[in-house]
Image (tube, helix red, strand yellow):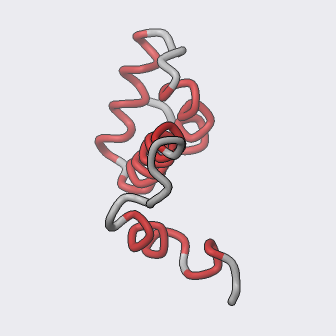
Amino acid sequence: MADCQETLNELERFLDSELSPVRVAEVIGHLKGCSDCQGAYEFHSELRTIIKTKAQNEDLPKGFLDRLLGCFGDEVLGAD
Ligand SMILES: [Zn+2]
């Protein structure tokens, strides 16, 4: 079973579909049982979607900023 650090290290490659099926199964298995890593995965996944669609749409998806603030607090958007 992969630990959190290992899973977080593999997230980018997981999202790029560059992991072997065995590693993919381990990452998914860990995500199912770990809400911290699940949150990190969802954040990375959503961030990628936003970056991909940003060329067509300058607006952030509804609710994304709320989730961003929920995960990281106000400082993530820069002090104002
Ligand atoms: Zn974890």
Quadrant position of residue 24? top left
Instruction: State the count of labels.
Output: 0
**Which of the pair 63/54 is nearer the observer?**
54
Residue at the far front in the pictured view: 56
Quadrant position of residue 79? bottom right
Report whether 4 appears left or right of 38. right
Question: Is residue 22 visible in the rendered structure shown here?
Answer: yes
**41 in relation to 67, above or below:** above
Residue at figure coordinates x 45%, y 50% from the top left? 57
**Which of the pair 50/29 is nearer the observer?**
50
Question: Is residue 3 visible in the rendered structure shown here?
Answer: no
**Which of the pair 3/56 is nearer the observer?**
56
Tell me the quadrant of the picture where the N terminus can be found: top left
Tell me the quadrant of the picture where the C terminus can be found: bottom right
Residue at the far left in the pictured view: 32
User: In the image, residue 12 lies at what x, y percent?
Assistant: 57, 32
**Which of the pair 78/70 is nearer the observer?**
78
Residue at figure coordinates x 50%, y 37% from the top left? 52
Residue at the far bottom in the pictured view: 80
User: In the image, residue 51 lies at what x, y percent?
Assistant: 54, 43
User: In the image, residue 13 lies at what x, y percent?
Assistant: 57, 24
Residue at figure coordinates x 31%, y 45% from the top left? 33
User: In the image, residue 23 lies at what x, y percent?
Assistant: 47, 18
Report whether 39 appears left or right of 2. left
